[in-house]
Amino acid sequence: MSEAIAQQWLESSASTANNKQFEAHMDLISKKVSVTGIEGFDNIDYDAWHRVCEKEFATGVLKGVRYDGLKMLSSSETQVQFKTYEVVEANDGTMNAHGMEVLLELEADGKWRLLKERVLSDAEAREDGLVQGTLLRTLLT
């Protein structure tokens, strides 16, 4: 069940971003979200995420988002924690790819939302088996 929740959230996150559905995308993010591990930033909160997504969606900077791999870590009735590999491609051809640890929480309205995200170092992503064969070849070409 927890793996299905994680997979559904990843699919919804990619789909709403790829289709520039700003409100639906932000509905996947908790107002209490905390993102760490991004160089140059201590923490990214909901307001910062909102501003960046709104600008990227409106200006057409984003070409596509995909997630590769899923490594379940833990789950309870109200939380699901896992690791995955995110690939974000811009329309100018630049690509940002990194492993990430994700904590989803079931909120009072019955929706699963991103509560915490930690961007992994390349070494940790490799150690977790998140960067493998085809994905690595895709990123290098």
Image (cartoon, rainbow, N blue to C red):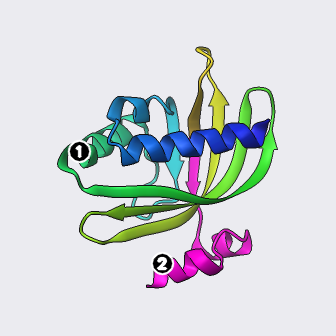
Looking at this view, name the residue that lies furthest to the left: 59
- Is residue 105 part of the magenta span, yes or no? no
Residue ID for mark 1? 55
Mark with earlier residue (2, 1): 1
Local SS, label 1: helix
Can you say whether 28 is above or below 19 in the image? above
Q: Amino acid at mark 1?
A: Lys
Label 1 packing within 10 angstroms: few (<14), some (14-19), many (20+): few
Which residue does the image show at 55% across and 57% down from the upper left?
67
Which residue does the image show at 35% across and 36% down from the upper left?
21
Residue 139 is situated, as x and y percent measured from the top left of the image, at 48, 78
- Is residue 118 part of the magenta span, yes or no? yes
The mark found on residue 70 in the picture is none
Q: Quadrant of residue 104?
A: top right
- Left of 137 or right of it: where is 54? left
Residue ID for mark 2? 139
Residue 126 is situated, as x and y percent measured from the top left of the image, at 67, 75
- Left of 14 or right of it: where is 94? left
The quadrant the C terminus occupies is bottom left
- Magenta segment boundaries in residue numbering: 116-141
